[in-house]
Image (tube, rainbow, N blue to C red):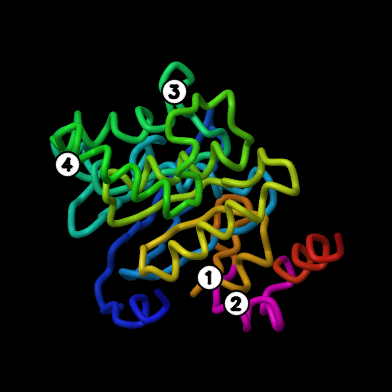
Amino acid sequence: MAAARNLIDRSFDMVVAENIHKSFDGVAALNGINLTVKKGEVVVIIGPSGSGKSTFIRTLNRLERYDSGTVTIDNIKLEDGANLESIRREVGMVFQSFNLFPHLTVLQNITLAPMKVRGLTRDEATRLAMDLLKRVGITDKANKYPSALSGGQQQRVAIARALAMQPKVMLFDEPTSALDPEMVNEVLQVMKELALSGMTMVVVTHEMGFAKEVADRIIFFDQGRIIEEGAPQDFFKSPKEERTRAFLGQILSH
């Protein structure tokens, strides 16, 4: 899989966010964010609570409307109407909470969107779903309901469900924050393998070990701005900004 990642043409801008502003009740949450993510790149966004990380990642598929600026994904400008639906078909998202349909089995959760949106037959969707369940290591849970699964297993189903739409970009909004500590690693392992396969990923997380190991680039948010960015080896060993040093000193000491 690492070889697959190395073969990707990194010259293509898969995600381009330009001058994104967003306020809630007059309080600025995003202050002119500019970020470009190359095809196959893994970008990890870190920062304190309330820094705008989750707000920003949700603007990339218009789950959160921004007040001004532009978002372009795979050369499609994000707008209401047809473009919005086109982009949402190409962008998978995994949330803190798993958001699985409790009344559907694991298999039904994964096959629903490919049949309704992509037009796959039930047999095609089932084959795809079983392949994805194998990929995330829980083929034996296909006919279980979400309530019968651990948190880590539910999050792996959520990842498989997002992948079933065969997206070009995967967004992760703190995907391990709702998990018990012993379940975190099983989800991070799936994400590592996904990164190695060449998927373009934007990940909001507090998992610094994952960021060091997997990210191509770390982005540090504070007060709705990008304070610093860089490759993991530079970012963690010699951060340039005092605010970054203070944040890392606090978070890495725990």
Relative to 133, say whether 233 is above or below.
Answer: below
Return the residue at label 3.
101
Return the residue at label 1.
215
Q: Residue farthest to the front?
A: 140
Relative to 61, say whether 47 is above or below.
Answer: below
Q: Nearer the viewer, mark 3 or mark 4?
A: 3
Q: Secondary structure at mark 4?
A: helix
Relative to 252, say whether 172 is above or below.
Answer: above
Answer with mark 1 or mark 4, whichever residue precedes in sequence.
4
Q: Are marks 1 and 2 in contact (CB under 8 Å)?
A: yes
Q: Nearer the viewer, mark 3 or mark 2?
A: 3
Q: Judge by depth and name the residue closer to the eye, 175 or 65.
A: 175
Please tell me how many numbered marks the rendered image carries: 4
Answer with mark 1 or mark 2, whichever residue precedes in sequence.
1
Q: Residue at x 55, y 77 (%)?
A: 230
Magenta stretch bounds? 228-243
Task: Say few, some or many: other residues with alpha carbon within 10 Å of mark 1 (under 14 / 14 to 19 / 20 or more).
Answer: many
Measured as percent of width and height from the top left, residue 4 is found at 33, 76
